[in-house]
Image: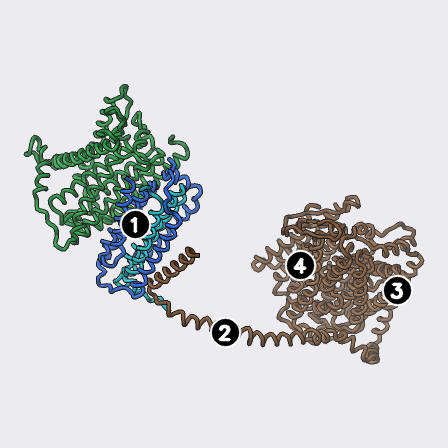
Chain colours: A blue, B green, C cyan, D brown
Amino acid sequence: MESIAFIVLSILALASALVVVLPVVRNAVVCALALAVNLICVAGFFFLLQAQFIGFLQIIVYAGAIMVLILFVLMLLNVHDERHLGSSGFFQRYLGPLLAVGFVALLVTSLVASLQGAEFPRAGAAYGTVATLGQELFTRFFYPFEAISLLLVVAMIGAVLLAKRRL
Amino acid sequence: MLISPVAVSLYKVLIIVNVLMGGVAGMTWVERRLSAVIQYRLGPNRVGPFGLLQPIADGIKFMMKEEVVPAEANKLIFTLAPALSLVTAMCAFSVVPFGPTVELFGREIALVIVNVDGGILVALAATSLGVYGIVMAGWSSNSKYSLMGGLRASAQMISYELALLLSLIGVVLVSGTLRPVEIVAQQAGWFWNWNVFGGWQLLGFVIFVVAGYAETNRLPFDMPEAESELVAGYHTEYSAMKFSMFFMAEYINMITVSALAVTLFLGGYQLGFPVPFSGWPLWMLQILAFVGKLAVFLFVFVWVRWTLPRFRYDQLMALGWKGLLPLALANLMFTALLVALDVIKR
Amino acid sequence: MPLGPEKFLILSAVIFALGVLGVLLRRGAISILMSIELMLNGANLAFIAFARQFGQAEGQIYVFFIITLAAAEAAVGLAIVIALFRLGDSTDVDELSLLKW
Amino acid sequence: MLNLIWIIPLLPLIGVAVNGLFGRRMPRAAVGVLGCAVVLASLLISFGAVWELSQLPVEERYHEVVVGRWMSLGTLVNQHPGSSTVSTDVHIDWGFALDPLSAVLLLVVTGVGFLIHVYSVGYMSHERDLVRFFVYLNLFMAMMCTLVLANNLLVMFVGWEGVGLCSYLLIGFFYDRPFDARTGLSCADAGRKAFIVNRIGDFAFLIGMLYLITEFGTLHMRTLAGEFQHGAGPEWLLSGVGVLLFIGACGKSAQIPLYVWLPDAMAGPTPVSALIHAATMVTAGVYMVCRMSALYSAAPEAMAIVALVGTATALFAATMGLTATDIKKVLAYSTVSQLGFMFAAAGLGAYIAAMFHLMTHAFFKALLFLGAGSVIHGLHGEQDIRRMGGIRRKMPITFLTFVIATLAIAGIPPLAGFFSKDEILAAAWNGGHRGIWAALLCGAILTAFYMTRLTWLVFFGSFRGDAETLAKVHESPRSMTVPLMVLALLAVTGGWIGIPKVMSGWVGGGDWNRLHHWLEPVVVTPHAAAQADAGHASGAEGMLIVLAIVVAVAGVLMAATIYRREGLAERLARASGPVYRTLRNLFWVDELYDVLVLRPFYAVCRFFNGFDRRVVDGLVNASGIVTELTGQVLKLFQTGLVRNYAMTFLLGVVAILFYLITR
């Protein structure tokens, strides 16, 4: 059951990621929608990994807010076509994929070497629940939490300053 | 096999989907009849007694109509959009408990489809994904009216989702859990145990309802489909069954928001007063209570639609960001204070 | 086929690498932003997988922070893109090469 | 009151703060009143504290107030050869202590200080920068009290440096005026000279302190004294530290070879000369040596050096005083000479005599300076004694008090100077140091001579300036004459607390040497001096006293005889020829320093200037050029294209990953 879900989700995730990335698809809105699919797939992985709360968060915040924002801007600027943009630079086009493949190859070899055949241990009942995470977040990670909320405020003000025509 | 847990879940899904569809059909009739009452006219009364068969006639009409797809539209997305709208609308209902755990066929069956940790989040996730249907529809139609509608819808839904979420957190604070089942269970007994009274969540309730209206794109917040400005907003280019799916999605959203409001603030299926009996008469009564509360909400939805005028777009945004959001924050802080001071016992 | 960390990590590496490729190959500023989100997702997946493997909440907390960070990043990034678009009527990053020498 | 001693240094600081911040917006009178009031408050608290101290039994006369921890310096581990390892927790407190020794100086400082503050109100009344003057003066009082009351050497050093700073500020008070025609110094230069010469001494002081703290782990003076008395610490260290501290004292107290700044310090306003450069600050060196009497008593070599330098200074400065023509410079050389007397006494182990002379000197030298100031004030700024004379009738109070002070410093009984100077001479004789005794006796004759010369030239004979100035000569205002009178009283009676046993025996009294008994428990006298003191024959002492009186009277009469006759002094000067020229030019010491120190220093500076410009700057410029060239090459990589950067980034990541995995 879980493996089937994993296989289906991986195929979906990889396919949507390819749509986002490959310059074959020149339509930015399609890319954004593909990215949304990818985000939801990743949320699915989170559910598989019993991180329900983070999964919901991924959908609500990432897919539901951030991606909608991106879509909104795409539609606002109406730059749904990248056709007029010429091909990318020489280095990026040829060396880039090579390096990316090298990156994956390096990681995969090391991961396979060290983790092959490992299985997930049984998770405790409290693992990944809202209560557990909240407990951690408001005790051990309290200062980072406050810092990140400050960051959000700063980002919000900065975004308004940047994007607004007249203040 | 027929009553294995998976099968039982499937039965529940089937029942709920059908009930929801039926509810939508009923709602269309109710809406038309009620609007007629409000506007001093008769409304549909030819098909069947009191026009009760009108929805079926409408359904047949939608299915028989020609599907028109604009030539420059993005076909895939254009087709996916209404389906997505409908599916997300229904998903949100899955965490709403419409009754207590009952004894049926010798096993315990919880009258809720999914009961997971963080259940409210499921509803929120589904709602937040609902934006995509509208955005996709608006964009893929390749029409300026649709695009404007889609833009407005996404901005509006993101803005009001904040207030919605924050008003929910008040309830979560009071009950200390994200599971709707437990939230409802805590509101048992007399009606002053309901969160709206016992949890001091009257303000949160009002914010939730207002934001809910905005989330469902109903009047007075129906900017995305403002007929006089945008023809029909994001579904201008839609016709036939695709159009009807948007239509159904809207009504299901109404039902879901109402159900959530009932569940979280008004005690869900709880009767509001103790009764001396238990067993099947009780849970039957409780399901009826749930449906009754829902009906009141839906009635108000319709009432409001045919009574209030539409906001201007900037007023709508101002209300969301400058009115509801600060109010929701204030409500949250107030609630947190009450909980911290043990005024509200959990 | 029992699930192990290995598959998730490989998947996360691939998603991350695809994000990197997107940054390198795409020219639209918003597309690059989206590719960055993809990279973040790859990293998030790895975090969650490790958290599951070691049964600790830290990984999930980090992902929580990363998601918040991504929200901030998207907000500021999109604001910059809008400002740039107003300036040059384009989101092509290759045209934004004024700050050299 | 004893617990309030920490307030004594703090009170003048209030004056500093208020006058410094708001003084320019306050009425001038208020500035002066506030400046005096804070010092008066300090004086009253000092009186109270000393009174309480004197009521305690002798062995308990030590009171310490620790305000707070200043610094913690960790743990000092000392490996003593042959014994176990000792670790001490090293820390320094803001601590103040009152004991009989500091009580003497405290009373002198606050008392004379207060009188001089009052005097300043009148003397500086026409000065534009009155506020600045009082701020500096109050700051000086605060620092001086810190120095006196410090319970450890570092806090003392704070006061030590603080008074040095105030001295610098006040010498250069008239920073825009020229000062000395011969050397071409301006007032600001004089201040700088004082400051720099003092730096040399302070540096030695600091090194001495560092030696002490690394050896003993504390700078607390009482603790240190205990250690010294128990024979702790190697002898070379004690001698070395003694010499180093004494070099510090030389700088502060203007002893050979660091005395050159004091005559030039006369560039400051006269009250400053009286307070800082005669009565209090310059005696800080003597005070410090007496404070550290335990150290010096354990280091005979250091003591010998102190005694020799003191004696030499006493004689040498006195000769320079013979020919000076500036009224304040005569007094300045006199001060140097008298300080030499004090150091000679301290070096001989007669710490009590040193402190005694310090105290009486503070009275009569302050009086002399204030009298000189009064004369200068009356003559509208004239300082050259060759253009004075015969003004005794026009300034009767000044004249009278000045004469009293002159007789006191000359050593005529029963004035203050007689007793203290006699005690020093007796100590030299009894210690068996006949050479020192003879030198000091010569110094005493010279002192009597040049002081009489000064008095005669200023107040007797006929006026040698122009008639216009003469017409305007007037007695000083009340605020100036009253301090003069008070100080004159002190100059007369100040010595009576230390009347030697022998003399009281002559008139049938008991032991009237109060000061001796007061200070005895505090100072540590070396064995030799103690024995000499105990075993001295009263017959010899009586002879000495008579001799001292004879010498003083002879000096006075000699000067009076020479300067009564017009032209005799000039003829004598011409007859002595080179001797006179040598004295007149102050042994060419300033010129000697110029050749020995300044010229080589400037040469080295010129060399380093060139080195800095060519080599160092060249290196800096070369690094700049290299950087620029590198940048010219590297800028080619800065394409401004974001994706190029991302590409490079990825390259780096893959490389690092490769390294990490294949390592």
The one nearer the camera, A57 or C59, is C59
Q: Residue furthest right?
A: D539
Instruction: Kindly identify which residue carries mark 4.
Output: D140
Kind of residue sitting beneath label 3: Arg
Name the secondary structure under disc 3: helix
Q: Residues within 10 Å of mark 4 (few under 14, many from 20)?
A: many
Name the secondary structure under disc 1: helix
Instruction: Kindly identify which residue carries mark 1.
Output: A66
C-alpha distance separating marks 3 and 2: 69 Å
Residue B111 in picture, x, y percent from top left: 25, 30
Q: Nearer the viewer, mark 3 or mark 4?
A: 3
Is the residue under label 4 in contact with that under label 3 (CB below 8 Å)? no
Kind of residue sitting beneath label 1: Ile
Closer to the N terminus: mark 4 or mark 2? 4
Kind of residue sitting beneath label 2: Ala
Residue D175 in picture, x, y percent from top left: 63, 69
Instruction: Kindly identify which residue carries mark 2.
Output: D622
Instruction: Kindly identify which residue carries mark 3.
Output: D434
Closer to the N terminus: mark 3 or mark 4? 4
Which quadrant of the rendered structure holds the N terminus of chain B?
A: top left
Q: Residues within 10 Å of mark 3 (few under 14, many from 20)?
A: few
Q: Is residue B8 above or below residue D289?
A: above
C-alpha distance separating marks 1 and 2: 52 Å
The one nearer the camera, D457 or D268, is D268
C-alpha distance separating marks 1 and 3: 102 Å
Say yes or no: labels 3 and 4 on the same chain. Answer: yes
C-alpha distance separating marks 3 and 4: 40 Å
Parent chain of label 2: D
Is the residue under label 2 in contact with that under label 4 (CB below 8 Å)? no
Residue at 83% across / 69% down in the picture?
Answer: D446
